[in-house]
Amino acid sequence: MEYDFLRNTITGTAFARFSMDHEALGFWLSEELGDNAEKYVDICQQIALLQSSQLSEWRLIGKALSIELDNEQVRVFANNIAEGEDDEAEMDESMSFYDGESEAFCGLEDFYAVLVNWRKFLDEQ
C-alpha cells in the first residue's frame, strides 16, 4: 500500500492519496478524520484495546465513509456500499464493479502506522 500526504496549494487543506485498491482509505483520512485530534486519539485508544485483546471489534460510522477494526484487519467502506450489492448480483457474471474507491482493507498495524504518519504530517504545518 503506497500513499502520499499532500496539501492543496490554494486552500492549504491536507489530503491523502493512496494506491489503487486503497483509495477509500485516503478519502477516509481526508474527509472523515481530517485534523480532528480528538477522533485520532480515540481511534488510537481503540487500536490499543484491540491489540491487547480487550476488544474484539470496533466500528466508527462517518458521514460518507465508515471503518471497522478487529485485532488483525481494518475495513474502510462507503456507507452506501450495501445498497450496491443487489445491483452487482443482477449483473452478468463476467462483469463486476470496481469498488476500490468505496472499500479498502489493510492490516491493523499498517493502519496504525498510516494514522501516526498522517498526524505527523498535519502537525508539521
Image (cartoon, rainbow, N blue to C red):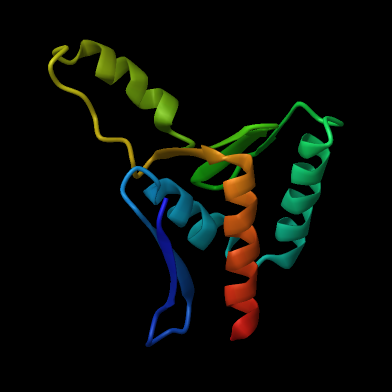
Residue 102 against residue 9 in the figure, above or below = above
The residue positioned 71% from the left and 59% from the top of the image is: 40
Q: Quadrant of residue 55?
A: top right
Indicate the position of residue 20 as horizontal and vertical percent values: 31, 48
Indicate the position of residue 104 as horizontal and vertical percent values: 44, 39
Indicate the position of residue 47 as horizontal and vertical percent values: 74, 44
Q: Quadrant of residue 92?
A: top left
Closer to the camera, 74 or 34? 74
Residue 76 seen anywhere in this rendered image of the structure: no
Indicate the position of residue 63 as horizontal and vertical percent values: 55, 47
Residue 14 against residue 84 in the figure, above or below = below
Horizontal side, residue 93 vs residue 73: left or right: left
Question: How many numbered discs, if any?
Answer: 0
The residue positioned 53% from the left and 58% from the top of the image is: 29
The residue positioned 57% from the left and 57% from the top of the image is: 114
* Quarter containing the C terminus: bottom right
Horizontal side, residue 93 vs residue 68: left or right: left
